[in-house]
Image (spheres, rainbow, N blue to C red):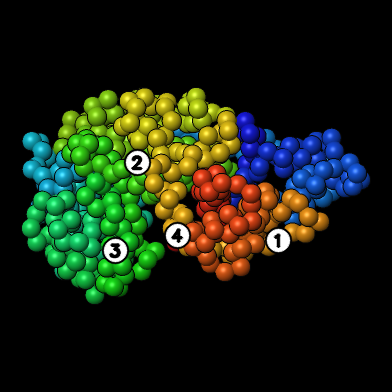
């Protein structure tokens, strides 16, 4: 896939994506269409071209044949559009919650005026399962406030649900329900805010909630429950993530079962005083590129919410928990059956949006692998065809936007180390070429970047690297600091080095 500056190679067998710099992109295209020999005379190529050719020859997605073999166009690899997609469903049995989190995207607290009864929920679940939905998240509100939560979970598991997750603040867990979940493969997603009690309870607005959440997670651990911990970051706790990770690990929760997220301007989160800084947002949020491949090896091209549903406590249906405004409501299960909602043209119009309809994205080489969130685009711009605000890639320039504010200075104070798996390729001098042995990712380093990479024979502080640059290069400190900050940002984003 050619972009305006760079290219991407989609490997559907391995479900992998490779990003190519402009020079390898151009060379690969020439090779594939027979416009340049793969083994040219040394005098016919520059050192940069030779390095790019060597990188391509070592890549896992190329092979040398007697004659050019043009790859198929990506459009021929796309899976046919499913007219009846069935993704995940979020169920909100109640809007009630025992906490009053200052940023709650659902504005949970008191019950909604016309919440569904238990019997109505059982009917809804039956309709969902009959329609082919198999993956469910029970949220809210706080699910454990709902008196008949056990009934809801039993109907899901006995009705054929393939996965069920309960999102909870873990302060009201009931041992019998936890045991049932453990026995039937139901997992939990716990929300927790900070290792600092005062920060956690400033967010929840309920005294004692910090200890209650910790006790709840201890119960889950003692029962062997499957659970993850989500740490939404806002103005109060945005600097607490390392300490919170440490506390959770002391509790016995593995690092890969916890992660930070950000507070969104939804519900009570519309108050600007509770939102995180831009630096926090772009330190936590990252582009997600993944290749969803069907069983027959075809590429699924769709945005995140395709085939998904949110059913609120009062029976309203939208395609996403972040899409709660009236314009996204496509049905009301108090007044119509699910089958009628699923035929709603507006629902299918929302499900069928792709990045081809987003002007800034329609030429991006990553668009077929982008885990795009149209709800986020709407939240920040009120335009469904606007750019996702958390995407930092500019396809026209082929570059990623650097983090804002003080992120560069933090990198200089970090410890920099090489990422495992890269090897240096001998190119007889410049340019300096490194290739990742497993993925085939190749990077040509300019003289400054090559100097830094050679320095990293062991982990070194960014400040030590800056001092070495001052001694080696004839440039003022401000210029070297600016260049080093940019190089470290690019190297970290490219996965060449680690910054800790």
Q: Nearer the viewer, residue 79 or 70?
A: 70
Q: Quadrant of the N terminus?
A: top right
Task: Point out the tag, 2 or 4, that comes first from the N-terminus.
Answer: 2
Identify residue for label 1: 424
Mark 4 to mark 1 CA distance (whole Å): 24 Å
For label 1, the crowd category at 10 Å Cα-Cα, with few meaning under 14, some 14 to 19 and many 20 or more, is few
Q: Which mark is residue 278?
A: 2
Mark 3 to mark 2 CA distance (whole Å): 21 Å
Mark 3 to mark 1 CA distance (whole Å): 37 Å
Mark 3 to mark 4 CA distance (whole Å): 17 Å
Disc 2, SS = helix
Identify residue for label 4: 414
Identity of the residue drawn at 31% across and 32% down? 379
Task: Point out the tag, 3 or 1, that comes first from the N-terminus.
Answer: 3
Q: Is residue 319 visible?
A: yes
Q: Are marks 3 and 4 in contact (CB under 8 Å)?
A: no
């Amino acid at each position: 896939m050619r972009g305006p500056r760079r290219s991407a190679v989609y490997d559907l067998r391995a479900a992998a994506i490779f990003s190519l710099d402009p020079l390898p992109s151009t060379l690969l295209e020439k090779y594939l269409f027979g416009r340049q020999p793969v083994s040219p005379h040394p005098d016919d190529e520059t050192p940069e071209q030779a390095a790019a050719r060597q990188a391509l020859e070592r890549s896992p997605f190329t092979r040398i044949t007697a004659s050019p073999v043009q790859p198929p166009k990506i459009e021929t690899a796309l899976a046919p559009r499913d007219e009846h997609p069935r993704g995940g469903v979020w169920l909100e049995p109640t809007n009630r919650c025992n906490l009053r989190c200052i940023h709650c995207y659902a504005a949970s607290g008191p019950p909604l005026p016309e919440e569904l009864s238990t019997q109505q929920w059982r009917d809804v679940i039956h309709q969902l399962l009959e329609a082919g939905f198999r993956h469910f998240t029970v949220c809210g509100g706080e699910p454990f406030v709902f008196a008949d939560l056990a009934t809801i979970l039993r109907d899901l598991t006995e009705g054929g649900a393939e996965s069920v997750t309960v999102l909870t603040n873990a302060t009201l867990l009931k041992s019998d329900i936890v045991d049932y979940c453990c026995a039937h493969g139901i997992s939990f997603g716990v929300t927790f805010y900070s290792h600092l009690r005062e920060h956690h309870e400033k967010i929840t607005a309920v005294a004692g909630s910090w200890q209650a959440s910790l006790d709840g997670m201890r119960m889950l651990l003692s029962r062997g429950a499957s659970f993850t911990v989500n740490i939404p970051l806002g103005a109060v706790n945005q600097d607490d993530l390392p300490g919170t990770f440490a506390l959770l690990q002391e509790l016995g929760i593995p690092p890969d079962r916890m992660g930070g997220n950000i507070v969104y301007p939804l519900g009570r989160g519309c108050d600007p005083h509770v939102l995180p800084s831009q630096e926090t947002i772009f330190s936590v949020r990252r582009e997600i590129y993944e290749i969803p491949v069907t069983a027959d090896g075809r590429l699924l091209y769709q945005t995140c919410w395709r085939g998904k549903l949110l059913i609120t406590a009062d029976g309203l249906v939208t395609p996403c928990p972040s899409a709660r405004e009236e314009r996204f409501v496509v049905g009301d299960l108090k007044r119509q059956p699910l089958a009628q909602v699923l035929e709603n043209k507006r629902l299918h119009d929302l499900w069928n949006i792709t990045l081809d309809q987003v002007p800034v994205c329609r030429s991006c080489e990553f668009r077929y692998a982008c885990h795009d969130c149209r709800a986020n685009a709407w939240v920040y711009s009120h335009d469904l065809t606007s750019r996702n605000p958390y995407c930092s890639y500019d396809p026209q320039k082929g570059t990623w936007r650097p983090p804002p504010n003080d992120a560069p200075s933090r990198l200089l104070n970090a410890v920099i180390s090489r990422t495992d798996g890269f090897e240096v390729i001998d190119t007889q001098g410049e340019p300096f070429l490194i290739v990742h042995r497993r993925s085939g990712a190749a990077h040509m380093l300019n003289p400054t970047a090559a100097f830094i990479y050679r320095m990293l024979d062991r982990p070194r502080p960014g400040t030590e690297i800056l001092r070495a640059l001052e001694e080696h290069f004839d440039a003022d400190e401000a210029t070297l600091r600016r260049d080093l900050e940019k190089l470290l940002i690019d190297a970290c984003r490219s996965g060449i080095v680690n910054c800790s």
